Image: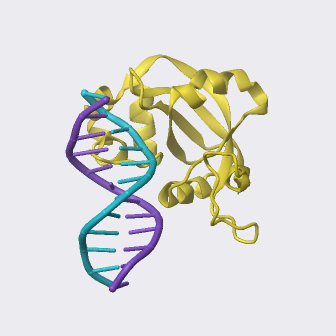
Chain colours: A yellow, B purple, C cyan
Amino acid sequence: MKYWLVKTEPDECSIDDIGKAGDKGMVWDGVRNYQARNFLRDMNVGDHVFIYHSSCAKVGIVGLAEVIEEAFVDPLQFEPNSPYFDAKSTHEAPRWSAIKLRFIRKFSGVLTLQQLKQLPTLADNPLVQKGSRLSVVPFAKAEYQAVLKQLT
DNA sequence: GCCAACGTTGGC
DNA sequence: GCCAACGTTGGC
């Protein structure tokens, strides 16, 4: 099993939205960055994924989800009216992938970016590095455990 | 809303 | 293949 973190703007897809989706899960689409896409394609069913709220008042990790469907073709790339439309993507060789996530738990508070930066275990993780714009981030097991430890 | 940092595009 | 210009991300 592997561990990950995905960034989301709470206006678009918050931890509560994932919670409301329940057992049927929620499609995680709209990734338009190659490095992030490659990580999506590395995800397997059962992997744990931290949910991180960005571009909001309280930036940080807010909950945990699991992968219930591995990478499939993101339909939005072929939707001309979608902000995620990509005119250069073809059905023969689709550029972008999506996954499906299912809610596991919401944390009682936000584990803020400021707090995350203070965890020595996370020092090398792109999440806490200045200027990093990666929206899908791999977590080593030790990093995953270090985050969970903050939540007791 | 600002702006630094980054990824992508496209002319050459 | 270089690199300037541009658009986007995301913390503050």
Q: Nearer the viewer, residue B2 or A66?
A: B2
Q: Is residue A139 left or right of residue A113?
A: right
Q: Is residue A131 left or right of residue A145?
A: left
Q: Where is residue A88 drawn, in percent x and y? A: 63, 66
Above/below status of A22 relative to A49 = above
Identify the residue shown where x is 70% and y is 70%: A93
Residue A23 sits in quarter: top right
Residue C9 sits in quarter: top left
Q: Is residue A121 left or right of residue B10?
A: left
Placement of the C terminus of chain A among the 4 image quadrants: top left
Above/below status of A124 relative to A24 = below
The answer to whether one can see residue A110 in this image is yes
Identify the residue shown where x is 64% and y is 24%: A17
Above/below status of A121 relative to A37 = above
Q: Where is residue A87 drawn, in percent x and y? A: 64, 62
Q: Where is residue A13 drawn, in percent x and y? A: 59, 30
Residue most extreme to the right: A24
Residue A147 sits in quarter: top left
The answer to whether one can see residue A152 in this image is no
Identify the residue shown where x is 61% and y is 58%: A41
Above/below status of A112 relative to A145 = above
Residue most extreme to the top: A108
Count of labels in the image:
0
Q: Nearer the viewer, residue A17 or A32?
A: A32
